Amino acid sequence: MTMTTADNQPLLKVVDLSLSYLTRQGPVPAVQSVSFELGRGQSLGLVGESGCGKTSVANCLMRLLPDNGRLTSGQVLLEGQDLLPMSEEEIRRFRWRRMAMVFQAAMNALDPVYRVGQQVVEAIEAHGIEETTAQARQRVARLFRMVGLDPQLMDRYPHEFSGGMRQRAVIAMALACDPAVIISDEPTTALDVIVQDRILRELKGVQRELSMGMIYITHDIGAVAEVTDRVGVMYAGRLVELGDTVDVLHAPMHPYTAALMSSFPSISGEKKALGTLPGEPPNLVNLPTGCPFHPRCAHATEECRREFPPQAQRGSQWAACWHPLNGAQESEQS
Amino acid sequence: MTNYLLRRSGQMVLTLFLIVTLAFFLVQAQPGDYAAFYSLNPDIPAEAREQIKASFGLDKPLWQQYLIHMKNTLTGNFGVSFGHYPRPVIEVLAERLPRTIVLFLSATAVSFYLGFFLGKAIAWRRGGVLEYAATISGATLFTAFTPAFALMMIWIFAFKLGWLPVGKFLDPLIWRGAEVTANHVFSYMLATAAAFVVFAFLTLLVARKSGRFATGRLPFLIIAAGAVAIPVAWAFTGIGYLALDILRHMILPIATLTLISFAGTMLLTRNSMLETMREDYVMAARAKGLPEKVVRDRHAARNALLPVITSLVYSLIFAIDGSVIIEGVFSWPGTGMTLLQAVRSEDLPLVMGAMVFIGLFSLLAHVIVDVLYVYLDPRIRYQ
């Protein structure tokens, strides 16, 4: 679980990324100075409540922003190349070729009027990966087999697929152009737990096998534990904690991470009432001063209200907190 | 599919039955005596009068007349037109109906294409000058009073500018001495148009089956070559100038109908596009790195087309309905004008015949669009 690759250059490096949405109430800072690195074959989780900016980060990486989205600062370096200053045509060639996405709602990520295989072929042909349509179709058949789908299904329409099959098809589609990085945005939320688990394992397997970098976005701590090497916790558009998954889950430093943890049941641990975190994530239009978490935090002091905290470091783990928890401490909010 | 079509045909026969019934009783409910009017018509010789009277059973009670009328209609006997005596109704309609269908099908096709194209463009680039211009002018024309607008078009383009003929189907001066009849020329024109549509369709089909989706411009060049070849071929037939005369007479009514009706398709397409543009598969298409035009046309617009096609049925039927007004203003001798003249001159068999045929056409339009829908939306399968 090292952070960088052998040649010492991370596969994907995100530096000080900030994004605002222009709205009638003024600019809404959806993502604020987010930085992280992703190595080859490594998998990074991004967790947090709904509306904390996880999906916005994913969209920034793919440069798939709505018309009112404005990147205010930052760099997204994929294999050393900055994606943000690229022209529309350059980024179009880049998308899916080097960085692909497994969509949040696989149900709706397939166009209902085209055959599933055709939609994968379309991506392959748009990037000229194969010479002929016949070769492209052979490639789709291989991809289908890789994700556990019968290749004969490629000539079916999306409505003829079950939820799990569609999710597999969407994964196959993401792998179509052999990308270096794959972004999975809550890929299994619409599925039942059994299928969810199976698909997670397969996704993880494929990622290892092809040695891709993966960014896994979810609010499900269980999935994070299963598929990610490192995990970042987001709150109100900021990355508030980042570290190796094992460390973060066992000894969270940020009170918010601890609160998130305590609200998930553990099968192996002792039986206890699940914790709840009072309040709601803050309104991004009108963020609290200082640390955005302070109104909900039991440890908040005067300085938390005044100034955004610096990073507290512990090994390869850090948290943006004035009063980081030390390993043994559990959340006191329940 | 075959089952579905059979069932639909059954339903059509039933609906047609109702239409014939309705037409019969509506005409019976007119003031004036059908039978008396018939037997007092001095244009009809006495022996023919008796013969027709017996064949229509005009001396029998109403319910018997109705049954006989139904039997006649279902066996294709629509009687003889009073106004065009002694031509049978069916012959008059066979001459007039294609003119109406061609005029309104072309107008519907043009306005559908224009409306869909504009709707797609203004949804994709919202808030542009084009959006305001197209929406305002479209809505204004859509709500304009049809006869007044049609007269205005005639006044501008035929009277003031003199570019196009004022109305009618052809110019008698040009046709003087022509060796073929207008109907012959018109049916050749229809055959040519039908052949061209089939040719274009097959070209696209072959292009689609054979290669990549970005097959390039080749199929369109082939179709364009076909479009150029047709007038050249017609020029060599010696009746090309006659066909040109009919075409010149078609331009103004088609343009008028298009201007009146394209806004409906345009606004519907725009709203439908705004829905589909928010769909995940459109975002996915963009994420896949497909060119913007492919995302717009093959994904967003392709899905936005579905509800628009549904509305096409209604606009087709509305167009045929509106043929009475438009054909009246442009003196276009189609079904609409025939119906209007027949009503005015109490040519009752022709009135009933025209009503039945307009009804039949509407039913066919419905079935055709239903079948088309199966090809456009794979989720729809008729059992």
Image (cartoon, coloured by chain):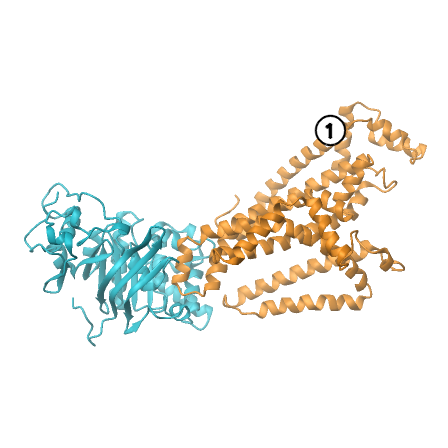
Chain colours: A cyan, B orange
Q: Is residue B73 depicted above or below A172 in this figure?
A: above
Q: Which quadrant of the figure has residue B328?
A: top right
Q: Is residue B358 left or right of residue A300?
A: right
Q: Where does residue B87 sit, x and y in percent of width and height?
A: 85, 42
Q: Is residue B247 depicted above or below B145 in this figure?
A: below
Which residue is more in the foreground, A207 or A329?
Answer: A329
Q: Is residue A146 visible?
A: no
Which residue is more in the foreground, A71 or A197?
Answer: A71
Q: Is residue B170 left or right of residue A314?
A: right
Q: Say which quadrant the N terminus of chain A sits in.
A: bottom left
- Element at label 1: helix
Q: Where does residue B125 sit, x and y in percent of width and height?
A: 48, 58
The amino acid at mark 1 is: Phe
Q: Residue at x 13, y 56 (%)?
A: A321
The total of numbered circles placed on residues is 1
Q: Residue at x 53, y 69 (%)?
A: B215
Q: Say which quadrant the C terminus of chain A sits in.
A: top left
Q: Where does residue B344 sit, x and y in percent of width and height?
A: 80, 36
Which residue is more in the foreground, B212 or A322?
Answer: A322
Residue at the spot of label 1: B25
Q: Farthest residue in the left direction?
A: A328
Q: Is residue B81 visible?
A: yes
Q: Which quadrant of the figure has residue B21?
A: top right
- Subunit ID for the residue under disc 1: B
